[in-house]
Image (cartoon, rainbow, N blue to C red):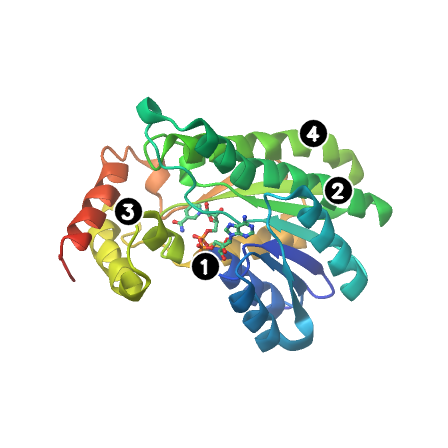
Amino acid sequence: MTGLLNGNVAVITGGASGIGLASVQRFVAEGARVAIGDISDEQGARIAEELGDAAIFVHTDVTDEAAIANIITVAVEKFGRLDIMFNNAGNQGDTSAMAELNADGFDRTLALLTRSVALGHKYASQQFQKQGGGGVIISTSSVAGLQGAWAGAAYTAAKHAVIGLVRQAAAEFAPLGIRSNAIAPGTIMTPIMANAFGVPREDATEFLAYLSQELGPKIPLGRVGEPEDIADVAVFLASDLARYVTGTVIPIDGGASAITQGTFGPDVVRASAEFLDGARV
Ligand SMILES: NC(=O)c1ccc[n+]([C@@H]2O[C@H](COP(=O)([O-])OP(=O)(O)OC[C@H]3O[C@@H](n4cnc5c(N)ncnc54)[C@H](O)[C@@H]3O)[C@@H](O)[C@H]2O)c1
């Protein structure tokens, strides 16, 4: 590692698993200190303990405005400042098709995936201004924020809206030296995939292997993604290497969103149903 984030303090939401966890580990390896925000208390606390002085865990439900404000306060109390806010927490949200849209589920999904990102910008930018300006915000959108048919309607809308927020933030915060960018992961092998399809926890590893086998060949770079593929781009955006980059969205999807996918979304649903019916690698 090359110390790209030496001396930086980051808040990473959803840092107890998957993309967030890989990012916590990469940020610390690059010299950052990190406050991990998640609702998964046991896992978050264990990860923070493993990382020693470089990390703390703060129970944070990103659907709660006060909790987002709190993790920034705690990070500043513990580490003295804030340099990077990574709005990443999420799950698949309400998976209803539009014809059966559930209004409450839709609102909950947007609160989790979109409102949390807006509030992350609000409180991080306030802290950055207290410090005299400067700072980086990264927000996790999705290929479902770029195209339809990757997920349910609520998730698709929520992840498109994340990109809108980042563009708005670029305009509002550039004068303060604050950069804001989105990342758009493709099919990344994390627990979210198993959770989304109701695969029992004990079958999750084999399920991900089955999905990799079924879906990898359809992706231009020939494989599904790993959390570390995303974490590396997050490090780039957080670092001075990206000093002239704001208001963008970077797809990290092996080229999947660059081509016409045809039936990729339905293929994921089909492969998941096959797995639950007993198909194995
Ligand atoms: N895995 C993929 O293929 C993929 C693709 C595109 C986008 N994403 C996005 O990446 C982000 C991370 O997902 P992941 O794949 O690493 O999944 P994951 O399930 O491994 O991790 C998500 C984390 O968010 C936490 N979380 C859920 N609800 C929360 C809440 N209300 N408050 C705080 N934390 C909460 C979970 O406890 C978990 O630790 C999500 O925003 C997801 O939508 C994932």
Give whichever of discs 1 and 2 has the lower sequence position. 1
* Residue type at tag 3: Ile
Residue wearing tag 3: 219
What residue lies at 24% left-to-right and 32% top-to-bottom? 262
Q: CA distance from mark 2 to mark 3?
A: 37 Å
Residue wearing tag 1: 18
Label 1 C-beta lies within 8 Å of the nearest ligand 1 atom: yes
* Residue at disc 1, secondary structure: helix
* Residue at disc 3, secondary structure: loop
* Residue at disc 2, secondary structure: helix
Q: CA distance from mark 4 to mark 3?
A: 34 Å
Of 55 and 198, nearer the camera is 198
- The image shows a total of numbered marks equal to 4
* Residue type at tag 1: Gly
Residue wearing tag 4: 171
Tell which tag, 3 or 1, sits nearer the viewer.
1
